[in-house]
Amino acid sequence: MNRSILVVICDFLILSMFALNTVGPSQQEGGSPLPVIVGKVEAKKTEATSPEKALAEIAGERDALANALRRTVDELKLERERLRTMQTETVELEKRNLRTGRTLESTRRELAESRGKLSVMNERLSEYRVSLSTQERELITALEKLERSIGELKQSNLQSDEYRKKLGEYEVNISYTSGKLSTIERELAETKGRLSVTARNLGSREVELGESRRQVDHLRGMLSSTVADLGAERRTGIEKQQKLYELQKLLAEAANRPSDSVRRDVFSSYAQAVGKFSVVMREDRLFSDFVGGGDYYLPVLELNKRRILIFDFGKLTGNPPGRTNFNRVSELGYSFAKAGAAGKGKSVQGPMGYWKKSPAIGVFELGEHANGFTALKILTAEELKKRGTEDLYLFKAGSAGRDSVNLAGRCSLDLASEYQSLCLRNAGRSVVSELRAEPGDFVLTGDGKFAALVTHIESFDQGRRQEARCFVFPKDFRFEDVKNVDISSKNSDGLYQVFAKDASEALRQAGEESRN
């Protein structure tokens, strides 16, 4: 019974598979083995001689068919898995396509906006190009004008050099004339002083004479008999008054006139020590070079067995007062000679420096170039304080003794400052008859010693009153406190760069010190 049921089931399965198979004969060669097996089963059924044999064969073929069926089921599972994977990938791909579409749409919008901006930028670029071309034309025109201006300026510089030479000659003449004029003005002021004293004496004598006349008239009325005797006495009184007046005049002139021996001492010492110190400094500029320096008449001093010059550091560098910034120095030179010698004299190389505690004080060592000069002794602050401020003389650095004056009544000592200094009272700007003290000028004593150097001017009452501050050597002055400035080294461009840097810094410090 079981075998019969199994045979029926197998037949049903085989027939069902055969019915489901729609593959043509030409395609069965590489297709499924089920049709072949079914054919074999049918052939075996017809060829079987007994049910047992057929059943055995059918069982063998059934096993083969079951194996084939399992392989087919496995293949179907694989296909289903493959199909499911493909469906999943398709869904993911659709999502990606959706996202890509959105991104593409956003990119298209951004691209449209970028194209709009690009068109605007192109328009602006065109405008900029037009503007740039206009500016280039204007720049070319300006450069042409600048070249023409430079050519004209060079021509003007050539003419200005000639003018400078003539101006130098005029300045020399004016300096000589102004010196003469200042001397005449000083003599006139002294004469006015003496005349005022004489006028006062005459006034007092006239008062006395009037009183004498009244007394004589009174005596004449009372003693008319003795008129002759009274006349004689009157003549004797007038002669006495005349002699008294002349004596007072001589005393006044003697009081106003300094001692001839003292004046001879200071000028004699000055003449043996003074020399002509020349400074040349040129700074390169874009249009017109700056040329500084000049000739100065300075006395040789002796300090700690060294022969030196003490001078305003700004003038030592060839710069005018107040100028503290310069860098492209292309020419720098110093020379020293006798005061009456022609030309610039022998070149001197220093060393040159400034006092660290007061950068306005310049020091220049002469060495063997001071041979032939009688150096002046230096008066320290302590010695000046003991000596007092009487009998001091101001000498201008711009002339060889021609501009000098006795400082009677114009000097005082500032004992409150860190380094005791000498103060000289200058008249205001409206007074031109007085010899004014200026930076670089110096003060000598009546016996020919160096007392002080004028460093800066302080103004009061809107310039109507001035005071010249003078440096007096302290007792503890040392050369170790002098900072040397290189005046010989040049850089690769031929410029005194180190000198310009150090000198500018020192002048800046000196300016700050004078303002404080």
Image (tube, rainbow, N blue to C red):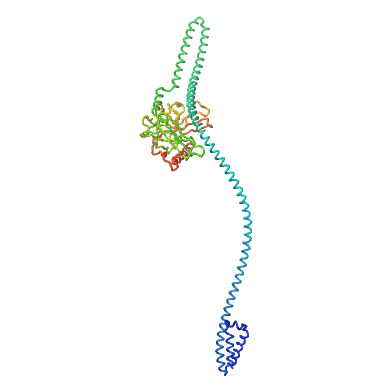
Q: Considering only vertical position in the picture, is 508 above or below 199?
A: below
Percent of width and height locating residue 60: 55, 89
Q: Between 295 and 54, which is closer to the camera in this rendering?
A: 54
Percent of width and height locating residue 223: 51, 6
Looking at this view, name the residue that lies furthest to the top.
Answer: 225
Q: Considering only vertical position in the picture, is 4 above or below 227?
A: below
Looking at this view, name the residue that lies furthest to the bottom.
Answer: 50
Q: Considering only vertical position in the picture, is 152 above or below 65?
A: above
Q: In this view, does 64 lie to the left or right of 451?
A: right
Q: Between 78 and 181, which is closer to the camera in this rendering?
A: 78
Q: Between 278 and 147, which is closer to the camera in this rendering?
A: 147
Q: Between 398 and 50, which is closer to the camera in this rendering?
A: 50
Q: Going 59% across and 72% down the picture, which residue do you hit? A: 89
Q: Going 62% across and 63% down the picture, which residue do you hit? A: 104
Q: Can residue 101 be seen in this view?
A: yes
Task: Report the number of discs.
Answer: 0
- Quadrant including the N terminus: bottom right
Q: Quadrant of residue 335?
A: top left
Q: In which quarter of the image is residue 384?
A: top left
Q: Is residue 394 visible?
A: no
Percent of width and height locating residue 129: 60, 49
Q: In this view, does 482 lie to the left or right of 44?
A: left
Percent of width and height locating residue 515: 49, 37
Q: Going 51% across and 27% down the picture, which residue do you hit? A: 432
